[in-house]
Amino acid sequence: MTDSTISSKLNALSKSKFRSKFKLTQKDREYIAAKGLETIKDHAFQFINNRVAPAFPKNDGKQTPVKGHPVFIAQHGTATCCRKCIQKWHGIGKGRALDEAEVDFFVALIMGWIERQVDKKEGEAFRQ
């Protein structure tokens, strides 16, 4: 996976009216600043592996909250929140576990989304 692949996918997702509604809150930003991006990345791996990577995830379609952790928000913003969204946006069908490369891609996508959100907010603060 390349940075341009991540960037292209993030650009496509940003054009979705629904996906573009998801934004990090100030509390999310503070959490990221306190924990650091490596810890957030570890959380992303845990959430993807435990909540969406199995062939038949528990409570599929309802397993990812819409608040409470920056990765949850990012999962909705990147369509990695459930297998239906993964199928629609990423072309990976339900009924089979995600492989290591797919998990790695989704984590990179989530982290790219988070980094864009953090950079965007810092840029906005700088311009004011």
Image (cartoon, rainbow, N blue to C red):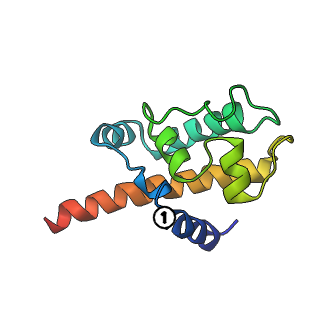
Q: Where residue 23 appears, x then y in whole percent?
A: 38, 50
For the image, the number of numbered tags is 1
The residue at the point 82 percent across, 47 percent down is 99
Report which quarter residue 109 is drawn in: bottom right
Report which quarter residue 25 is drawn in: top left
Residue 25 located left or right of residue 38: left
Q: Which residue does the numbered mark 1 point to in the structure image? A: 14
Q: Is residue 55 above or below residue 78?
A: above
Of residues 86 and 6, the one nearer the viewer is 86
Q: Where residue 35 appears, x then y in whole percent?
A: 41, 36
Farthest residue to the top: give it. Answer: 58
Q: Quadrant of the C terminus?
A: bottom left
Q: Where residue 20 appears, x then y in whole percent?
A: 44, 58
Q: Secondary structure at mark 1?
A: helix
Of residues 42 and 57, the one nearer the viewer is 57
Residue type at numbered disc 1 = Ser
